Amino acid sequence: MNKYTKYERARIIGARALQLAMGAPMLVKLKPDELEKINYSPIEIAKTEYVQGIIPITIRRPLPTKTKR
């Protein structure tokens, strides 16, 4: 798993939670009792996927360019 800033982590988990809320399939296997424990929360499911490192989202960081003006 890459090293992300807290803002990138929040963005990744939020974007994945939105996907899950809109009906995307879960990438992690959770038992029915585990789902009830987290109250079927898309955010908690996205956090679980993030911790396991299986979220299919990447971050592109633009590099500074060396141009003269």
Image: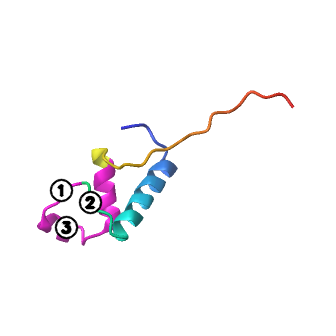
Determine whether 47 is above or below 59 in the image: below
Q: Which residues are magenta?
A: 28-50
Alpha carbon of mark 3 to alpha carbon of mark 1: how far? 10 Å
Say whether residue 21 is left or right of residue 35: right
- SS for dot 1: loop
Determine whether 5 is above or below 66 in the image: below
The amino acid marked with disc number 1 is: Lys
Q: Main secondary structure of the magenta part?
A: helix
Q: Is residue 30 within the magenta segment? A: yes
Can you identify the residue that label 3 sits on? 35
Q: Position of residue 32 (x, y in %)?
A: 13, 67
Label 3 close to label 1 by CB (< 8 Å): no
Can you identify the residue that label 2 sits on? 26
Can you identify the residue that label 1 sits on? 29
Determine whether 44 is above or below 4 in the image: below
Question: Which quadrant of the view contains residue 48?
Answer: bottom left
The amino acid marked with disc number 2 is: Met
Question: Residue at horizontal 49%, vertical 49%?
Answer: 8
